[in-house]
Image (tube, rainbow, N blue to C red):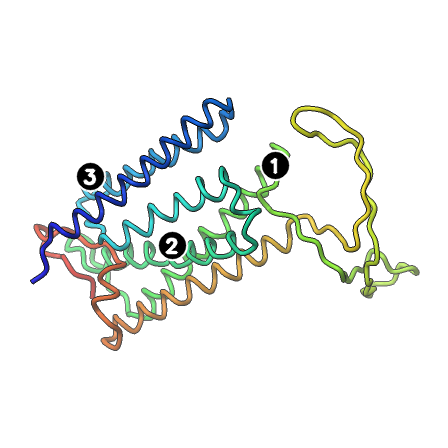
Amino acid sequence: MKNPKKKINKKLVLYFVLRITIFAILIEQIRLQNFHNVFLCVLTLGTFFFPAIVNKKMNIELPDVLEAVIVLFVFATLILGEIEEYYVKFKYWDTILHTLNGFLMAAIGFSLVNILNKSERIHLTMSPGFVAFTAFCFSMTVGVMWEFFEFFMDMVTQSDMQKDTWVPLISSVSLHPEGANSAVILDVTSTTLKGMAQVNGKTVPYSQTFESYLDLGIYDTMIDMIVNFVGASVFCILGYLYKIGKGKGKIFRNLVPRFKKKNKINTPE
């Protein structure tokens, strides 16, 4: 039998390393007087208490694997992505995280429905297919709400959470020379941007010519939704196979929360 202390030690080591790293970044951001990043560090540290709250207050046990994935996801999103600028340094960083988000949200949605399915207080029984479908809808809804949030923040704070995309080819009805309701396919050879730019709190003249067209967010939003769909679909397919007895139980049990043993409902079905 495996020694449970080894699992606990691994989890403690993970939390210790992440917290030490975040504290070091926090001190550096305070020195630089970048209080937005200071807030992100504090927010990340705060989210690390979420698994413990779920375990104690809601009487739900989070598998160590799922808990590790969640805290690493938060770290990769707020610390590496925002503060260390991995979203800019690595082309597919945002895409990877949105795929993982779809997977995680499907796991949470699956768990919520599964717990209701097994609760003695709620007379509710759903088929494996409906449980998987509900988890999929939950994941996609969270993904859509996040895209709403990104759009709202970009409009209100003039940020760029919906990262812009340079595209060499566009099709547009608005650019039709005769005003007809048919798309004109335009091979963009150059785009010139002119204006006054806000850089480090200073207003400076800006003028630059590019060899493509700057799309303001729609490509990023649609790619995020597509990979969220992929992540959610993968988990829901695995969950469905497990529910009908054709999936690997060990893998699935490491990803799905469950009631603690004293509630006599300790394993997902």
Query: Quick one: label 3 or label 1, which is nearer the N terminus?
Result: 3
Quickly name the residue at label 1.
159
Q: Residue furthest bottom?
A: 246
Quickly name the residue at label 3.
57
Q: Position of residue 83 (x, y in %)?
A: 49, 37
The image quadrant that residue 256 belongs to is bottom left
Q: Position of residue 166 (x, y in %)?
A: 70, 54
Query: Quick one: label 2 or label 3, which is nearer the N terminus?
Result: 3
Q: Position of residue 265 (x, y in %)?
A: 13, 57
Q: Secondary structure at mark 1?
A: loop
Give the residue drawn at x 79%, y 50%.
210
Give the residue drawn at x 65%, y 27%.
200
Spatial distance from mark 1 to mark 2, Cα to Cα? 25 Å
Quickly name the residue at label 2.
105
Circles 1 and 2, Cβ within 8 Å, touching? The answer is: no
Left or right of 33 in this view: 138 = left
